[in-house]
Image (tube, helix red, strand yellow):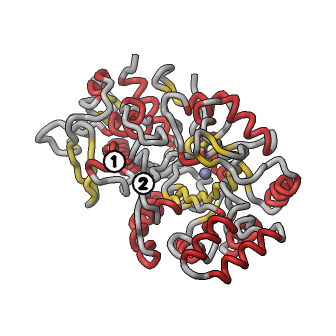
């Protein structure tokens, strides 16, 4: 049974992954005692009901930002001090647990046509805070309170990379069908010369989307590195498209080796069905190479009841599927790698989740958003600034097919403008495997 202790330990593990010195400090969560910091556990009873959403949220204010919390003692200030004890009168532990663990998706039965938890069902949508990483703010409050209570200054991890890190990745869905898909679009616009060019390129076995070397070159131009998620299953699944290429072909196997030699990571892009089937996921990863570390599921498919088990059984070290397709922002309200919570065995899952904050398709899609290219930066800048402020890890997905200048909505021009912005903001770039190595140590598995 879920207890306040289990919830506290899970959240504390994540807090200490940012501030390791906190491990030595004592915090009282909902119990009485002599520790110097006490946090009220008013939100805890919510979890016994096993319902997806709290009936109402309270709002608190911290350093000028309004934040939702699951429970706050009415009419009390956020912090109070008495008898050598500081008390936080908002249940930041339960609130952090709610978002990091994946509670709302696990207990909500709402799904879209791809069996995904819809953005519109989320608390973030209902209360409009998807672009605020509220768990990072909770941790900010906790840090401030601990420093005050114990008269110390908590430092972030000593070997922390300069802070703001970008995890850039590319889902490789299509490498061979620009001549057909883009060719048709160009013909519809009357650009027959373009269509002819695309068809000729294809005839020369250089389809316009067979562009991974161009992708790598563009990424290098910004002093960056990235991760390629390869779709290892060709053809269709229940009418939905998987890869338009066969990864076993020698030309792709050669390309995988060349990208690895140039410092890029190759990982697996679990095809339709693999998010619920660990044998399938394992077989797909094996088509790449035996040392594949990470995964992102095609179409961002993720069933909270089955997918974490599939990732665990397939021995993958990290996943980076959890972002909303319909809107950029913070699906788990957090901008660092974390471990989802196993509600059956009541402990964190062994794989790391590196949150996905922005997907190219989200910016321009009939079912998602329609942001004009010239408005993309101003639209996403506040979210980037939040991640920069916390020195977090920004998850960015740009498909290889959108490295084309023929895509005027969310193509090469928009990608380059985002990369310039990121460089100006002083980010560093790391592959998923490198990020995973750092954070797996800071979020140790505990039995
Ligand atoms: Zn995909």
Is any atom of residue 158 visible in this view? Answer: yes
Q: Is residue 419 left or right of residue 370?
A: right
- At x 57% / y 38%, what residue is drawn? 443
- Residue 391: % across, % down: 50, 59
Q: Seen in the image, is 186 located left or right of residue 221?
A: left
**350, above or below 253, in the image:** above
Vertically, is 7 above or below 331? above
Which of the image's four quarters has the C terminus? top right
- Residue 191 drawn at (x, y percent): 60, 82
Respond yes or no on whether mark 1 lies under 8 Å from ligand 1: no
Gap between marks 2 and 1 measured at Cα: 9 Å
The residue pinned by badge 1 equals 120
In percent of width and height, residue 371 lies at: 41, 70
Q: Is residue 162 left or right of residue 341?
A: right
Determine the residue positioned at 72% across, 34% down: 282
The answer to which of marks 2 and 1 sits earlier in the sequence is 1
Q: Are marks 2 and 1 in contact (CB under 8 Å)?
A: yes
Residue plotted at (33% across, 48% down)? 124
- The dot on residue 326 is 2
Mark linked to residue 75? none
Image coordinates of residue 19 in percent, x first then y, are 49, 46
Tell which of 26 and 40 is nearer to you. Answer: 40
């Amino acid at each position: 049974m879920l207890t306040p202790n289990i919830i506290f330990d899970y959240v504390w593990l994540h807090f200490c992954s940012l501030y390791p010195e906190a491990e030595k400090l004592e915090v009282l969560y909902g119990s009485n005692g002599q520790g110097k910091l006490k946090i009220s556990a008013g939100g805890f009873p919510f979890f016994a009901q096993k319902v997806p959403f709290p009936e109402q949220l309270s709002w608190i204010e911290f350093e000028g930002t309004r934040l939702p919390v699951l429970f706050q003692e009415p009419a009390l200030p956020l912090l109070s001090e008495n008898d050598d004890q500081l008390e936080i009168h908002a249940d930041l532990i339960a609130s952090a647990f709610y978002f990091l663990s994946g509670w709302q998706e696990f207990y909500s039965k709402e799904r879209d046509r791809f069996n995904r938890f819809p953005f519109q069902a989320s608390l973030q949508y209902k209360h409009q805070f998807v672009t605020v990483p509220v768990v990072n703010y909770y941790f900010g409050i906790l840090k401030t309170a601990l420093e005050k209570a114990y008269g110390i200054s908590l430092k972030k991890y000593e070997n922390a990379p300069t802070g703001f890190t970008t995890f850039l990745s590319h889902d490789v869905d299509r490498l061979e069908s620009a001549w057909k898909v883009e060719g048709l679009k160009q013909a519809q616009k009357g650009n027959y010369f373009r269509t002819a060019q695309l068809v000729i390129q294809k005839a020369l076995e250089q389809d316009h989307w067979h562009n991974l070397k161009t992708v790598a070159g563009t990424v290098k131009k910004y002093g960056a590195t990235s991760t390629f998620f390869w779709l290892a299953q060709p053809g269709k699944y229940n009418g939905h498209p998987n890869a338009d290429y066969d990864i076993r072909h020698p030309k792709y196997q050669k390309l995988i080796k060349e990208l690895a030699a140039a410092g890029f990571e190759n990982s697996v892009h679990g095809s339709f069905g693999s998010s619920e089937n660990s044998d399938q996921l394992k077989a797909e990863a094996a088509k790449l190479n035996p040392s594949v570390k990470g995964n992102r599921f095609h179409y961002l498919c993720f069933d909270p009841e089955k997918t974490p088990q599939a990732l665990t059984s397939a021995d993958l070290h990290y996943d980076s599927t959890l972002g909303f397709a319909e809107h950029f922002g913070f699906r788990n309200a957090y901008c660092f790698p974390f471990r989802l919570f196993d509600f059956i065995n009541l402990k964190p899952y062994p794989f790391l989740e590196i949150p996905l904050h922005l997907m190219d398709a989200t910016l321009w899609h009939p079912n998602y958003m329609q942001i004009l290219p010239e408005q993309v930066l101003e639209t996403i800048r506040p979210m980037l600034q939040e991640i920069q402020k916390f020195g977090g890890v920004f998850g960015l997905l740009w498909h290889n097919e959108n490295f084309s200048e023929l895509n005027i909505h969310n193509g090469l021009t928009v990608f380059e403008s985002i990369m310039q912005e990121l460089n100006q903001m002083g980010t560093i770039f790391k592959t998923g495997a490198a990020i995973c190595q750092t954070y797996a140590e800071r979020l140790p598995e505990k039995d």
